[in-house]
Every structure is written in structure tokens, then in C-alpha cells.
Amino acid sequence: MANRPLSPHLGIWKWGPHMLVSILHRISGDGLALVGLPVLVWWIAAMASGPAAYDSFLSHAMSPYGMVVLIGLTWAFFNHLCSGLRHFVLDMGAGYELDTNKRWSIISMIGALVLTAAFWAAIFAF
Amino acid sequence: MGNGTSIGRVRALGAAGHGTHHWLLQRFTAAGNFLGGVFLIASFLFLPDASFATVRDYFASPVPATILALFLVSVFWHARLGLQVLIEDYVHTAGNKFAALVLLNIFTFAGAGFGLFAIVRLALATTSPGGAA
């Protein structure tokens, strides 16, 4: 260790909603990039290729493991969307007061879960 | 710009030394992702079924195909910027960082290029592949 005062590292802080929303923004964003984009391109290429490739994509997508991936990706999408909108507000210099910051952190995470549930409820209901 | 004082010379440059360009592009592409993402989610909700004919005919028509192509460029660009920050944060060896950034560029350009090719083929096909006209 350096023989000088060091800034406190992650381990000593008490976890709060603002820390969770921050790391979930990174996790959902990188999950979308590394898993979501290959799935998106696979789906588009399957549409362009023809019925056989499309049905192959759909059989994977509708299987139990496919549903886990798709529901995970829609959660990641809505989570990254909600916390991204939160970032736009923070970029304007607003919402840094402790209680406001905490409230909107919680709202963006719950909002993502609600939107994910609503999306799949609408897909399965119709 | 600065007036020669030490704070004036570095103001708005940031730790990377080249200003807010990366940060701004992340925001501009985020706005594109928002619009395209809402379009895609709404499309999935309003399409009557998930059959090949329904979904293909919809996304092969001019406006949805154009939006899908623009969305693809926006998300791949945004993902390139975001994964670049991930690499810069966690990969500290100069050589490994360079290699990771090279792979990232290949991954994003190849993915976007192949996706755009597929959309062009989808939209310009004169007959449904494997089906009737």
C-alpha cells in the first residue's frame, strides 16, 4: 500500500439506491450490448433470410431458455431506459439533493420492473 | 477558452484531454435509441401475431425498415461508446486495453454492417423469400 492518505474505496460505503441504480445502469447497458445486439441482428438476419431461418429463431426465442434471455433483455432495456432518462435530468444539474436523488433512483428501478411486467403481460394477453 | 491560468487551460477538457465529444455523442445516440426503442416496443405490441409473414411484411415496408436501420446505427454506436468506457475502467494494461478496443471496434462495425445488409435485403426483396410474391 502507498504510504500516504488514500481515498476510501467502494468497500467502506453503506449501500444506497443511488449506488445500485448506477451499477445496474452499467450492467443492463453492457448486457444489452453483449447479448441484446447479437440477438437483434440474429432476428433481423432471420427475417431477411426466409421462413426457415425465422422459424428457427422463433423456436429458440419461445423455448424456456429463450424466454429467460428475452425477459432479461427487456428488463435490461427498460432499466437502461429509465436510469438513462434519470441521467438526462442529472446532466441538467437537477436532482442532486440527497432525498430527491434517492427517490428518483428507487422510482427508475421500480419503473423498469413495472414496464417489463406490463410489456410481457400485454404480449401474453393478446 | 482559458485566459492562461492553470484552471482556464484545462476547463472543459476532462481527464481524457479531448473535451466532451465522447460524452455528447453518448447523449445524442441515447436520444436515437429512445425513439427507436419506443418504436420497436410499440411495433411488437401492435403487430397482430409473430408469424413470419406478418412480421416480415411489416419490417420490410419503407418506414419501419428505415427506422430499424437508423436504430441499428444508433444502438451500435452507443454500445461502442459504452463498452469503450467499460474497457477503459477495468483494463489497465496498455497492450490489453488496445487489443480490447480493437476487438470492440471489429464487433460493433461487423454487427452494424451485417445488420444493415440484412435490412437492405429485407426491404428490397421483390418477393417473399421462400414464399409467394
Image (tube, rainbow, N blue to C red):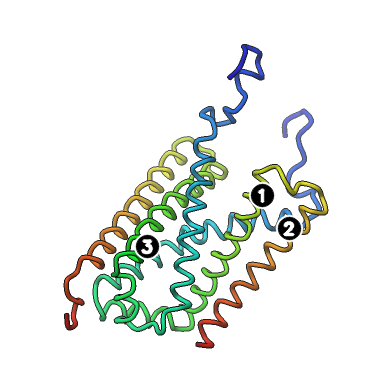
Q: Chain of mark 3?
A: B
Left or right: A93 in relation to B15 = right
Query: In terms of image quadrants, where is residue A62?
Result: bottom left
Residue drawn at point x = 17 percent, y = 83 percent: B132
Tell whether label 2 touches label 1 (CB within 8 Å): yes
Left or right: A24 in relation to B48 = right
Q: Which residue is mark 1?
A: A89
Q: Chain of mark 2?
A: A
Tell whether label 3 touches label 1 (CB within 8 Å): no
Q: Residues within 10 Å of mark 2 (few under 14, many from 20)?
A: some
Residue drawn at point x = 16 percent, y = 80 percent: B133
Left or right: B116 in relation to B124 = right
Are the residues under marks 1 and 2 on the same chain? Answer: yes
Which numbered tag is attached to residue A104? 2
Image x and y of residue A69, in percent: 49, 73
Image x and y of residue B102, in percent: 38, 43
**Amino acid under disc 2:** Trp
Label 2: which secondary element? helix
Residue drawn at point x = 46 percent, y = 64 percent: A36
Residue B11 versus residue A88 in the image, above or below: above
| Gap in angstroms between the C-alphas marked 3 and 2 | 31 Å
| Gap in angstroms between the C-alphas marked 1 and 3 | 27 Å
| Gap in angstroms between the C-alphas marked 1 and 2 | 10 Å
Are the residues under marks 1 and 3 on the same chain? Answer: no
